[in-house]
Amino acid sequence: MTKEISRELPDSLNGDLRSKLMRWETLLMVFVAIAFFTNTQLSPYFLDPWSLSDATFNFTEKAIIALPMALLIIARDIDLSVASTIALASVTMGFANSMGAGPIELAMIGMAVGAVAGFVNGWIITKFDIPAIVVTIGTMSLYRGIAYIVLGDDVYRSYPDGFAFFGQGYVWGVVSFEFVLFLCLAVVFGVLLHKTTFGRRVYAIGNNPTAALFSGINVKRHRLFLFTLVGLFAGVAAVLLTSRIGSTRPSIAMGWELEVITMVVLGGVNIMGGSGSIVGVFIAVFLMGLVTFGMGLMNVPGIVMSIFTGLLLILVIGTPIIWRRILSARKLRSQKQG
């Protein structure tokens, strides 16, 4: 019964108890408005178009990984190695750059390394039936370790000029290439999850993988595809991040896996699988971006932001479960009294 409860809740605090005003996405929008208003009070420059554009750089790369991660978590899996995949892809791009690769080749290499890393995760998990959290914790250390072995304490710099466009370019006025790419991908993943047979199969696998298997869905193949997809977009994020900062260190993107998963869960995707929406994740990444940007305006240290992210993750997962248990206890008491 506990599992059924926790699987239902993240879409709304109270199921269909109240009205649409109590929907999870509506509550997120309220918090986005509060964060936006708070930031305007913290800095008179926040509403400047260039400040708003800078704020989007705060979350777009992580948000691009959060989109496929949402599908993976809905299917009852998780990938904790995405930040290390970014490090591995970035180091590989740095090495290729030292060999004379051009901007397009670097981008292709980064995405290919990410896809291969994700495929390796999915292959080990589906082939040997090992829990995803165990395998991806292992590859989290493996991929990061390879990056340290290759680069050590050195830094790859001097990327070609054309490569900077991916992470620093603007397509129209203050609208960055990264932000436009994220918006386009959000639409694509929204359609993929909510309007296609593949999306319905992802929900079916997340709700009951055994029943999905007996209904004719190739569960292993879908899981393998989802892990590869997450790896591919970790590679995309590696291209954007490396391009934006113009250098590569093996410690790049350290701790990003926590923020990516927080974005997904904050968006209403059930950590137990089976429910969630891209709309919720879309709103959640804006909320996370505004909150972290606001803390940046207050000169809050990065370690404090990490503590905040960890607490937020626990709060988001725990609150709906506790809320539902309170309601269940009240209902049980009223039935006994009746």
Image (cartoon, rainbow, N blue to C red):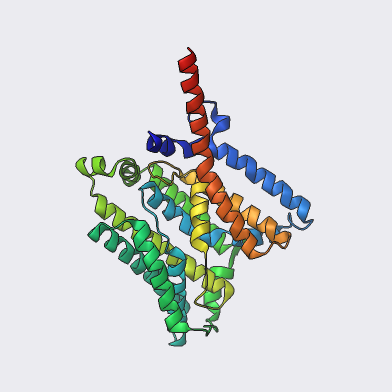
User: What residue occupies the far bottom of the structure in this picture?
Assistant: 99
Residue for point 58% across, 37% down: 26
Q: Quadrant of the N terminus?
A: top left
Can the viewer see residue 181? Answer: no
Residue for point 49% across, 14% down: 337
Above or below residue 329? Residue 201 is: below
Q: Is residue 230 left or right of residue 302?
A: left
Counting from the top left corner in percent of width and height, residue 164 is at: 55, 74
Counting from the top left corner in percent of width and height, residue 233 is at: 43, 62
Q: Nearer the viewer, residue 99 or 123?
A: 123
Above or below residue 100? Residue 177 is: above
Above or below residue 250? Residue 61 is: above
Counting from the top left corner in percent of width and height, residue 156 is at: 52, 83
Count every numbered label the image shows and give the total: 0
User: What residue occupies the far right of the structure in this picture?
Assistant: 44
User: What residue occupies the far top of the structure in this picture?
Assistant: 338
Can the viewer see residue 152? Answer: yes
Q: Nearer the viewer, residue 124 or 183?
A: 124
Q: Is residue 262 left or right of residue 142?
A: right
Q: Nearer the viewer, residue 95 or 311?
A: 311
Q: Based on the displayed image, in which of its 4 quarters is residue 297 positioned?
A: bottom right
Counting from the top left corner in percent of width and height, residue 336 is at: 46, 16
Q: Based on the displayed image, in which of its 4 quarters is residue 304 positioned?
A: bottom right
